[in-house]
Image (cartoon, rainbow, N blue to C red):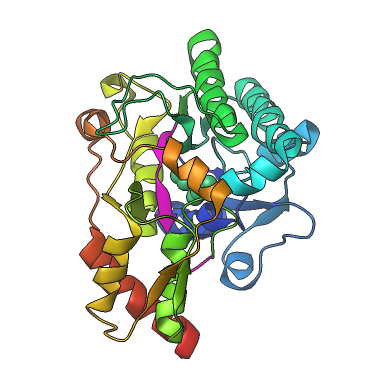
Amino acid sequence: MKNVLVIGSTGQIGSELTRELRKHCGSDNVVAGYIKGCEPTGELKEGGPAAECDVTNPEMIAEVVKKHNIDTIYNLAALLSVVAENKPKLAWKIGIDGLWNVLEVARENKCAVFTPSSIGSFGTSTPHEMTPQDTVQRPGTIYGVSKVTTELLSDYYQKKYGVDTRSVRFPGLISYLTPPGGGTTDYAVDIFYSAVKGEKFVCPIAKGTRMDMMYMPDAMQACINLMEADPEKLIHHNGFNVTAMSFDPEQIFNEIKKHKPNFEMEYDVDPLKQGIADSWPDSLDDSCARAEWGWNPKFDLNAMTVDMLDKLSKKLLG
Ligand code: VAH
């Protein structure tokens, strides 16, 4: 991995991954791809090259890949689960028509490709406890349908054309840098903002709803370590289960309360988010990722809470 293009570099994952990749590969070797109206700013803009790169425009992708001699594409362009349910056609256009464009450019230019899947690729008929790596995937959301298709199309290009496609199924991602953009697991980020601001948190997810989660630094390591793993050791290529913790709203609330004794929470369940959350696993089996490429998260709920409160307090309160 020498010259990298991050498509969707200003999003929740892309903005942090571009920074991490620049530290890892060298600032000049990581191109921040963006679309009009979502141009990089601040460190993302100053920290290295950027290029307009709309995933729905194959010529644009090819031009950037050739100009910067790209050998690895991180394709992070997607609508998250809740937004996607309200804009299903656009979700498919970005998620799948866009993926097709990326895979074709990768095939023609011999690039490796990472396009994340999600625990959203599972549905109500999937075993919910310790969800296996290889199991039933019949999601009921357009987000989930697009993520299963992402896994299958990426596997197809790997088998048929030898394109080196690899990816993980991300759980909910928690970060203090870039706020999430319309997902079912956003509550696990929003709760920290309420706690730091001294506000009561109104939780849109029902008591007892467990979902897998991960702190963003661990997600960054997953993105990089998988792409640099020895291909000879990979049995799977796309859609590795990865997780770091599984909790419900009460558990994260009580962990935060250890540090903010006056913090309060009440429930106001959002039916759309709750319906999606109920269809997702309660916990994942990530043993294949651990065995095939050494996946090993560093942050559990306790460690993430300490770091999130510290970093968010500095960000919001100075
Ligand atoms: C969402 N944060 O909620 C994303 C993610 C597993 C959750 O895919 O849509």
Viewer-closest of 37 and 268: 268
List x then y, in percent, for residue 237.
39, 24
Q: Is residue 221 visible?
A: no
Confirm whether the magenta stretch covers residue 174: yes
Residue at x 79%, y 33% (from the top left corner): 59
Q: Is residue 88 left or right of residue 151?
A: right
Residue beneath the point at 58% across and 33% down: 141
Q: Which residue is pictured at 42% across the width and 86% down the height?
A: 198
> How many numbered dots are placed on residues in this image?
0
Figure check: 6 above or below 113: below
Q: Nearer the viewer, residue 244 or 188?
A: 188
Place residue 47 in its image quadrant.
bottom right
Residue 107: x percent and y percent?
Answer: 61, 21
Say whether residue 66 is left or right of residue 150.
right
Of residues 242 and 162, the one drawn nearer to the viewer in this rendering: 242
Residue 107 left/right relative to 177: right
Q: Is residue 11 above or below residue 211?
A: below
- Quadrant housing the N terminus: top left
Please indicate, yes or no, whether residue 288 appears anywhere in the rendered image. yes
> Residue at 61% across / 51% down in the picture?
31
Q: Position of residue 100 (x, y in %)?
A: 67, 25
The residue furthest bottom is: 318
Does residue 130 sit above or below 36 in this rendering? above
The furthest residue to the top: 160
Is 218 colored magenta in this rendering?
no
In the rendering, at what x and y percent does residue 67 appear? Answer: 70, 41
The magenta segment is 167-178
Quadrant of residue 106 in the image?
top right
Residue 7 lies left or right of residue 155; in this view the side is right
